[in-house]
Structure formats: C-alpha cells, structure tokens
Image (cartoon, rainbow, N blue to C red):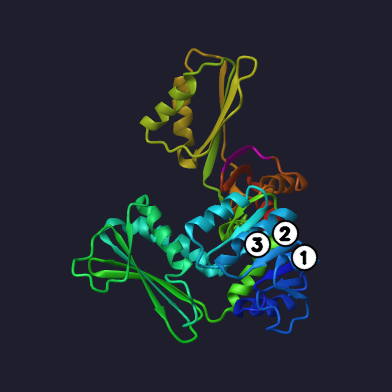
Amino acid sequence: MIKLILHGCNGKMGQTVVGAADANPEIRIVAGIDKYSGNKSNLFPVYERFSDMTEQGDVILDFSSPSALPDLLEYAKKGKTPLVIATTGLSDQDMEQIRQASKEIAIFQAANMALGVNLMYELVNQAASVLGERFDIEIIEKHHNQKADSPSGTAYSLAEAANKAFLNSRHYVYGRHSKSDKRSKDEIGIHSIRGGTIAGEHSVLFAGPDETLEITHQAQSKQIFALGALTAVQYLAGKKTGLYNMKDIMLDQNAVTNIHTNNEEAMITVNCDSDDPTFAAKIFGKLAQQDIVIDLISQTVPENGGFRLSFTLPQQEQDHAMQILEKCKVGDSSVKANTCSDITRLTVEGPGMERQPGVAAKVFEIMAEQDIRVKMISTSETKIAVILPRQDEKRAVESILEAFHL
C-alpha cells in the first residue's frame, strides 16, 4: 500500500482526492498539509506546515498553489520523497525550480491530470502538422468562476502542442479586445471564459478555407482529475530520479497495442564466404532497378571472411529476385542463395515500447516456450517483427495476445 501525503487537502480538489483515495485499496492518506488545517474534518492528521508533520509518506501529492512550491520542493528533496505536482498556474520560474529538483528526486508534473486531455495534446499536434499554414488556430478554455489563473495551464499546453508543428514560430494572442488590425497567420489565439461551476472545457479550433475542425475535451466533474492524480501517484511510487508526465503513463500503459501477421512474403538468404563490402550494394541496386520492393533486411556480422544476408519481399517477386541473384554471383562459387515462402511475418507494436523495458524479452520467451524457431528479427523503437514458420503462426499469435492482455 502507498502511504500518501496530500498537500492542499482541504481545498476543493484536495477533498475530491480524499474521496477518491478512500475508494482505492492501494492508497492510504497518512497526513495532510493545508494552511487552513481546521476547515475540514478528515480521518488523517492535518498540519499547517511540513515542519510540524511527523508522519512519513511514500509519495506527496500537491493540489495547493504556486506560492507553496519552494517549501514543498525543499521538504520533498530533504526526505527524498517522490512528488506529484497537480497545481496549476505555475510560472516559467516555477517550472525551472521543478526541473532542478527532479535531478534529486522523482517528480511527476502535469498541467492537467485527465487522461483524455493528455491524449488531446497528441491529436492537436498531429492536426497542426497535417493542416499546416492554411489553417488558423484558436483555443477556447472554460472554467468555473472560482478559478484564479487565466488562461489555464492546459490551454498553454495545447498551444505548445500545436506550436511544435511550426517549430515554435507562432506567437500567442490573448483575446482581441480593442484590437483593430487583422489576424496574422503566425498567431495562435487563446481565450478564457469563467462562469458558474464549469469543471473544465478546452477546445482547439482549426479554421481553414471553407472548412473547420474542432477538437474538444469536456470535464464533467473534478473526479477525473482526482483519479488521474492518484494514477500518477501509483505510477511514481518507486520511480528513479527524473521528471515525468502523463505521456509517460500513457506509454507505459500501451507497451503493446497491436499485433498483425503477413503471409504474402518470401524470405531470401544469401551466404557469401568472402567479405565483399560492395556485394550488398550490388544486390539491392539490381533489385531496385527491377522495381522489386524489399521489406525486412538482416545481416550477420562478418566472421571468418564471410557473412549472411537475409531479406523479405513479395512472394510473387521471389523467382525474379533469385534470377537476379544468379546473375550477380556469376563466377563466384562462394555465393549461395536460397528462398523460403512458407513463412509468416508477425509484428508486435505499441508506442510504449520506446520507454518500457522487457517487451522484446517477453516476445522471445513466448517463442521459446512454444518451441518456435525464429528465422529473422527486425526491430525499431515501437515495433518488433519476426519471421517464423507459417505452421507456427496460430500458436504464436494466441500466446502473445494472452501475454499482453490484448
């Protein structure tokens, strides 16, 4: 069980977190910090300052105010306690303090703890990249009438996500009251609305010639922020020093998202007894001249003056490719080539592979447990592709689906 210290426990978000933590059997709040320590009745002790607290926690969760940041960071660093910062309205100077502190402790910081909003960042960046210069970008954020900071930290983050597509070349314009000039192409408009009990709504409008695209996230209650913050608490517990954010959680949760197979490829393997550095260039050059598309390529490290080169290509091209190889090796008896068409390419992919260790290990443990002979391997940051006998496809797919809960 994670012992949690809740900073800002008597505020509206703090009390929402208290309720959410009561329903989570893996988290127990052992103490709270709040400058109005007597305002609420809690089942845990509440102190006005960290120096008064005697309890020890595994993680600190902060839902307070930017003014409390220096004391919060100092306490966390002193006790080497991981820290989740969910406070909004942080300045550039505050963020620099957080970055420096993350060199000594594990810190999780996010402008918005809702998973949907953090996915929205990725969608906005992708939309800005695709739609480009022809579309104007406007951001509208709405919150309750008690929210102090404006624009919201989430609005800034959405603007930054869009601006990355333009190499951060666009500037931000906050509202247009009293402006008499036309909108420029290199700006991103940001607008704030405050009223009632709106939990939070963010929209990014892409307005182009005769069409518009709008991406919107609506928070129905503060509960989603509390649940997201507690997810961050569970994620951060036990993490090594560094600065983490919601993208880290999403990637870890999505280590493997999809697997697929391809039975329409053949594999050609070329064994050469001589280490000729021009041989691969000659082979692939000749294949390219005949419009033969090559997919996976694998070459062994030259050993004892020779090497082995394997590659995959469409099955209908294998005979043509073998004829080309025969011409390439004329007069060289050290070169031998063979082809195999009874194969399956199995691809395991997911955005979280880039940051989560052990995915490749699990895939190859499955191959070993199922006694499947892998003929070829190709990897990237987010993908593992293996060539295996077609007869083993069903067992491999079923085992991987089970292992990664797909």
Secondary structure, mark 2, is: loop
Residue 307's x, y, as percent?
59, 22
| Amino acid on which disc 3 is placed | Leu
The quadrant in which the C terminus is found is: bottom right
Residue 11 percent location from the top left of the image: 62, 78
* Distance Cα–Cα, label 2 vs label 1: 7 Å
Give the crowd class for mark 1: few <14, some 14-19, many >=20 residues within 10 Å: some
Can residue 391 be seen in this snapshot? yes
Q: Which residue is mark 3?
A: 72
Q: Residue at x 60, y 80 (%)?
A: 12
Badge 3 element: helix
> Which badge, 2 or 1, comes first in the chain's sequence?
1
Left or right: residue 3 versus residue 331 is: right
The residue labelled by disc 2 is: 237
Q: Secondary structure at mark 1?
A: strand
What's the magenta region?
374-380
Residue position for label 1: 2
Q: In the picture shown, does residue 200 fall above or below 229?
A: below
Q: Residue lying furthest left in this view?
A: 181
Q: Is residue 182 left or right of residue 318?
A: left
Query: What kind of residue is marked 2?
Result: Ala
**Which of pointers 3 and 2 lies earlier in the amino acid sequence?**
3
Marks 3 and 2 sit apart, C-alpha to C-alpha, by 17 Å
Q: Residues within 10 Å of mark 3 (few under 14, many from 20)?
A: some
